[in-house]
Amino acid sequence: MARELADLPFARYLTPFEGEPAREGDYDCVHVEDRQLEHPTGEYVRFEQSAFSSLTITRGSFRYGRFDDVWLRAVAFVGTELADTSWQDAEFVEGALSGVDARGAVLRRVRFEGCKFDSVNFRGAKLREVSFVDCVLRHTDFGEAELNTVSFPGSTLTDLALNKTRMRKVDLRGATRIGVAEGLDGLRGATITPLQLMDLAPSFASALGITVADEP
């Protein structure tokens, strides 16, 4: 994983990006940095072998955008629409997503590290070979999403929504906390530790209508 911009295999080919992403824009080997973008409109945009750093994007729309072989560091998406976007071979380091709509997005070979997710909508999204490392996920909605080969080492997950979520090869054993607000059956297909099972026991009992009480 590239910790610094210079570590990227395409770093020497990057050119500074000026202006704002345009609808249906096609960009290769650009570096977008140190910017505050308000209400950018970049539907159907495509970025390939590009980098984003020290960037805040507020109330933008990149619906149907495609991001291939991209690197993001210290990038914040606030109230931004990423619905139906495609992310492949992407690295997202020390970033934040708050109030983001990513329903229907497709993520393949994506790594998040040290990122914060707050009220992010992944409903109907497809995640394959995705890792969340040392991340915080709060009020994240994976309803009707497909998670395949996804892991959460060192991450904290609270108030997850897993209604009709489909999991396969999902490894939750490295998560430091797991809290499910709704859709406990969406955990089917995941692997957890015995200790995590004990932590989830009250939620399972509540979902099944079981009362747990001491003997009279």
Image (cartoon, helix red, strand yellow):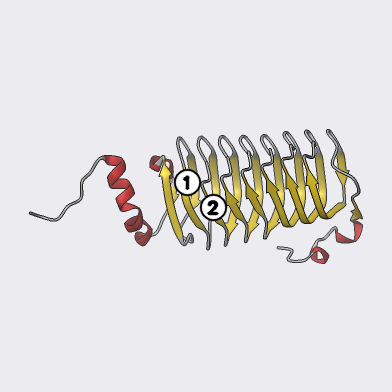
- Identify the disc placed on residue 70: none
Q: Residues within 10 Å of mark 2 (few under 14, many from 20)?
A: many
Q: Could you say which quadrant of the image residue 12 lies in?
A: bottom right
Looking at the rendered structure, the secondary structure element under dot 1 is strand
Q: Position of residue 159 (x, y in %)?
A: 46, 48
* Residue that extends furthest to the left in the rendered view of this protein: 216
How far is the residue under mark 2 from the one under mark 1? 8 Å
**Amino acid type at mark 1:** Leu
| Residue under the point 84% across and 41% down | 21
Looking at the rendered structure, the secondary structure element under dot 2 is strand
**Amino acid type at mark 2:** Leu
Q: Is residue 20 left or right of residue 122?
A: right
Q: Earlier in the sequence, mark 2 or mark 1?
A: 2
Q: Is residue 127 left or right of residue 30?
A: left
Label tally = 2
| Residue under the point 74% across and 55% down | 72
Q: Position of residue 19 (x, y in %)?
A: 90, 45
In the rendered image, the quadrant that contains the N terminus is: bottom right
Q: Residues within 10 Å of mark 1 (few under 14, many from 20)?
A: many
Q: Position of residue 160 (x, y in %)?
A: 47, 46
User: Of 139 and 128, which appears nearest the observer?
Assistant: 139
Q: Position of residue 167 (x, y in %)?
A: 48, 43
- Above-or-below relation of 3 to 78: below
For mark 2, what is the residue? 137
For mark 1, what is the residue? 160
User: Of 178 and 111, which appears nearest the observer?
Assistant: 178
**Whether residue 143 can be seen here:** yes
**Whether residue 188 can be seen here:** no
Q: Are marks 2 and 1 in contact (CB under 8 Å)?
A: yes
User: Of 126 and 141, which appears nearest the observer?
Assistant: 141
